[in-house]
């Protein structure tokens, strides 16, 4: 789900199985020496757009770096590093946007990019469409850097490789495991944002994470267990995030659970109380709340990958989304969460916005233009995947506020139910209403006790009906900001990093064990 990169301004190095090394154009040092001029390039792009007739323009000069290490069955499968640098400029003219980007880091090229963006805006304005206006935001000159203890790019590759090789070896030593994998990924994104209204903001965002999984293969079954969650856990911060996972301590357990699932009983088909572990509830929030509340989908501007939305702005403030325990916020200020930053890609400060309050829908994810149309304050939720992509409405940290219970109390108060953990599959219609999820593992809950393990657990529901059944939530001690590093949206597709705080929760009378 990673979009195409611009090849001629990218350094790439790949190591596969410790045998193959490929070295691309080494642009990292060149762009680093130009770091001090990136505000100048962004300002040149904005001025180029204004000189060409734009009524508003903003530009982002950007340096991004990614490192990814993958291990399989005790060997390093691949090592990849990527760097990107360039300037993207947005111009508003005649009520329409134009966008252009360049990876040629010179003032002349940046100015030309601004002129091209204005030309595209002028052409776009020939299509009948309501004029675009922007809701006011504070004009800021500021800087922001992700708080972190240990820069992930300063940690030796050998240390990272040894960790992943060690845990995949440990998982393979469990009888019945056919495949053991582990991953670490790190990102550093530096942005210099300038607008024609006077914004001048620099940011450095540091993110990293990873995880591992073990797959067991039986005669008629294949089962997988993952840690810390399916596809790994990611957050803003330094390498301390990886150390906190303590992957070696969990490797034998997840391998043994994968093997045990092969002989576990199938999850029965029933209407039952459903207890969800927090990472599964996080994905439930992402799919049935996060995408549904994106204002560009509600307005019908965007439908790629996740469809539109069942929500109607006329019902904002009155629609019952769930039970009174349901309190959802979008909080871009949450420490260490993956959707946290200082300012979005329109220069709007990070903030917390109420989305669902006591079960009632009260807020949306918005940018300056969509918020103006809806008559709402801008939420600071517009971001782009790289310098060469047009910013759009994206989730920040959309999560549920904790309750006052605990997982142990939820289990002890459930007479007949199923406890499911760790996502395995998901499907939801393009209005974000009718869904079905599968999990890696489940346990029967009888008379307040966790019982036998169950394989292939699934559940289904309709968004507002499902959320109306929420009746217990664990408290702050079990509240985790799960990260999603692969949220796809748009054409061309863009990948966003989002966060989803969640706790274990119980839903009454849910259809589980669905097949097909």
Image (spheres, rainbow, N blue to C red):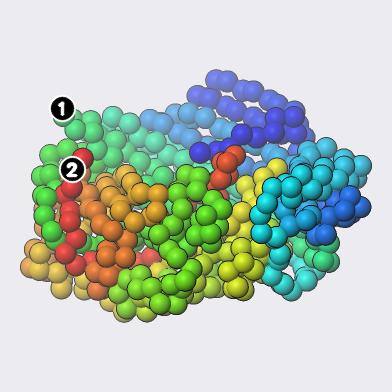
User: Separation of disc 1 and disc 2 at Cα?
Assistant: 20 Å
Label 1: state its secondary structure: loop
Examine the rendering and report whether any part of residue 310 can be seen.
yes
Give residue 46's quadrant in the image.
Answer: bottom right
The residue located at (66%, 65%) in the rendering is 368
Q: Measured from the top left, where is residue 487 in percent x and y?
A: 49, 48
Relative placement, left or right, of 393 versus 408 is right
Q: Nearer the viewer, mark 1 or mark 2?
A: 2
| Position above or below: 152 against 77 | below
Residue density around tag 2, few if under 14, some if 14–19, many if 20 or more, within 10 Å:
few
Relative placement, left or right, of 108 versus 399 is right
The residue located at (24%, 73%) in the rendering is 471
Examine the rendering and report whether any part of residue 239 can be seen.
no
Relative placement, left or right, of 88 versus 299 is right
Q: Camera-side residue: 252 or 1?
A: 1
The residue located at (12%, 44%) in the rendering is 266
Q: Measured from the top left, where is residue 77 in percent x and y?
A: 48, 28
Residue designated by label 2:
515
Residue designated by label 1:
219
The residue located at (71%, 40%) in the rendering is 84
Q: Measured from the top left, where is residue 107 in percent x and y?
A: 90, 45
């Amino acid at each position: 789900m990673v979009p195409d990169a611009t090849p001629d301004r990218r350094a790439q190095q790949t190591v596969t199985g410790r045998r193959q090394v490929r070295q691309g154009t080494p642009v990292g040092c060149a762009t680093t020496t130009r770091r001090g001029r990136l505000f100048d390039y962004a300002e040149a792009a904005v001025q180029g757009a204004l000189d060409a007739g734009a009524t508003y323009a903003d530009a982002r000069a950007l340096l991004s770096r990614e490192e990814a290490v993958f291990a399989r069955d005790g060997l390093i499968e691949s090592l990849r590093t990527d760097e990107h640098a360039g300037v993207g400029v947005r111009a508003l003219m005649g009520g329409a946007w134009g966008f252009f980007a360049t990876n040629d880091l010179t003032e002349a090229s940046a100015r030309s990019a601004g002129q091209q963006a204005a030309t595209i805006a002028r052409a776009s304005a020939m299509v009948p469409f309501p004029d675009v206006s922007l809701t006011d935001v504070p004009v800021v000159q500021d800087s922001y850097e992700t708080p972190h203890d240990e820069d992930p790019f300063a940690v030796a590759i050998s240390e990272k490789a040894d960790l992943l090789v060690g845990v995949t070896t440990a998982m393979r030593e469990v009888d019945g495991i056919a495949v053991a994998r582990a991953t670490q990924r790190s990102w550093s994104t530096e942005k210099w944002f300038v607008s024609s209204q006077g914004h001048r903001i620099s940011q450095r965002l540091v993110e990293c994470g990873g995880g591992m999984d073990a797959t067991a293969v039986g005669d008629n079954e294949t089962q997988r267990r993952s840690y810390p969650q399916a596809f790994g856990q990611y957050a803003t911060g330094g390498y301390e995030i990886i150390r906190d996972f303590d992957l070696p301590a969990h490797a034998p357990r997840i391998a043994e659970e994968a093997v045990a699932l092969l002989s576990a009983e199938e999850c029965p088909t029933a209407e039952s109380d459903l207890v969800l572990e927090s990472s599964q509830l996080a994905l439930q929030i992402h799919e049935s709340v996060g995408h549904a509340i994106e204002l560009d989908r509600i307005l019908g501007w965007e439908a790629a990958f996740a469809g539109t939305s069942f929500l109607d702005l006329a019902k904002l403030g009155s629609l019952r989304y769930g039970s009174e325990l349901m309190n959802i916020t979008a909080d871009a200020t949450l420490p260490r969460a993956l959707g946290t930053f200082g300012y979005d890609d329109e220069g709007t400060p990070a903030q917390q916005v109420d989305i669902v309050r006591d079960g009632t829908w009260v807020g949306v994810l918005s940018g300056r233009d969509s918020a103006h149309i809806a008559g709402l304050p801008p939420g600071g939720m517009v971001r782009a995947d790289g310098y060469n992509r047009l910013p759009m409405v994206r989730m920040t940290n959309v999560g549920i506020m904790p309750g006052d219970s605990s997982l142990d109390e939820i289990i002890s108060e459930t007479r007949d139910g199923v406890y499911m953990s760790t996502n395995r599959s998901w499907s939801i219609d393009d209005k974000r209403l009718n869904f079905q999820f599968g999990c890696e593992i489940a346990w029967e809950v009888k008379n307040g006790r966790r019982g036998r393990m169950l394989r292939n657990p699934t559940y289904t529901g309709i968004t507002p009906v499902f959320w109306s059944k929420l009746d217990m939530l664990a408290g702050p001690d079990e509240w985790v900001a799960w990260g999603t590093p692969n949220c796809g949206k748009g054409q061309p597709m863009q990948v966003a990093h989002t966060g989803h705080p969640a706790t274990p929760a119980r839903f009454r009378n849910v259809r589980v064990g669905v097949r097909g």
